[in-house]
Image: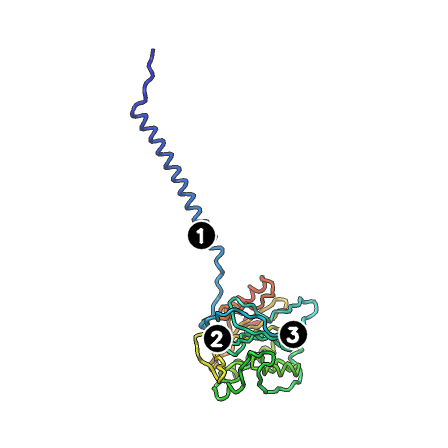
Amino acid sequence: MAQKRKPGKRSKKKKASRINRGLWIILLILLVMLFSAILLLMYDQYKQRPSDKPVSSYPIPTAPTTKPTRPTTKSTPTSKPTTPAGKVSYTSLHIPQYTTSSTECVAHHTGYTVSFNTKYQIPNWVGYELTREKTKGDAKRSNRFVSDPTMPECCAHTSDYTQSGYDRGHMVPAADMKWNTRAMEETFFLSNICPQHPDLNQKRWKELEDKVRDWAIADSAIIIVCGPLINTKSRKTVGKNKVKVPEGFFKVILSPYKENPEAIGFIFKNKKAVNPLHTYVVSVDSVESLTGLDFFSELPDSIEEKIEARTNLVYWGLK
């Protein structure tokens, strides 16, 4: 009768080899799964990364760190936009949204809205709509600068600018309010005024104001938002009320009611400006990066993102 052969050393080695091979396969599978998980995590982080926006070469001011106080004052609300027949109507295109915190006191005047910085005694921004009809009128320029009566926090005084070397620079120009005497007078509220270099205020800034009225006539209605660029580290002020001297100024303009809306931005340093106007043009995205403001957010995203990323000099007659 044949006897069963007991397993020898060779069979034991084969069995151990098969076990080791299985362990290596399991380890390899685990490594592949770990590597795949890492790749998926990196891909998800890449997709969630905020998109880069073009940044102007102008130095970015440090944003104020105090919490926003919107709104703290009330006044006469602005009139609703006058739009061409059949066009969608917007009501708040002239009011930007903050992407950073800021100190402000908001007032709605007859022809414009102002966000006033109570710490620096100058506006953060002013916004308004200018229609073709509003470019006409015979309201007299008052030239009477006064503190904003709707804002007890507005402590700036016209004497703060006397012999300072700076003009009382309008953000909303008086000439845009010829359609209404009260609107005209309210442009001389010191909540609408900044210390502005004379050779900027009286030259390129004024040239742009004139262009804005031409664009309002051509396009039936446009939206304007403008204001100072503040360097929080600078201690430069004027007058006993320590009115802050801006590092520069911005202005963004939107033509919302054309078949293909367009927008454009401008950045000026607060100094003599003699270069051609088109050299101060930047994208609206660039101004948003400098100011921490989100302009024209009432527009559909598909339109807003497109027009804020480009600068169409031909459309605006600057090329």
Task: State how many labels appear.
Answer: 3
Per the image, label 3 sits on a secondary structure element best described as loop
Q: Residue at x 41, y 43 (%)?
A: 32
Answer with the quarter of the image where residue 312 lies.
Answer: bottom right
Say which of marks 3 and 1 sits in front: 3
Q: Upstream in the sequence, badge 3 or badge 1?
A: 1
* Residue 1 horizontal side relative to residue 228, left or right: left
* Residue at the spot of label 3: 77
Other residues around mark 3 within 10 Å, as few (<14) / some (14–19) / many (≥20):
few
Per the image, label 2 sits on a secondary structure element best described as loop
Position of residue 59 measured from the top left corner of the image (x, y, whole percent): 44, 72
> Does 200 sit above or below residue 89?
below
Q: What label does residue 230 carry, if any? A: 2
The Cα–Cα distance between marks 3 and 2, rounded to whole angstroms, is 27 Å
Q: Residue at x 44, y 47 (%)?
A: 37
Answer with the quarter of the image where residue 80 lies.
Answer: bottom right
Q: Inspect the image, locate mark 1, and give the three-letter code of the amino acid beneath it.
A: Met
Answer with the quarter of the image where residue 28 lies.
Answer: top left
The way the protein has been coloured in the rendering is rainbow
Q: Residue at x 43, y 75 (%)?
A: 233
Per the image, label 1 sits on a secondary structure element best described as helix
* Residue at the spot of label 1: 42
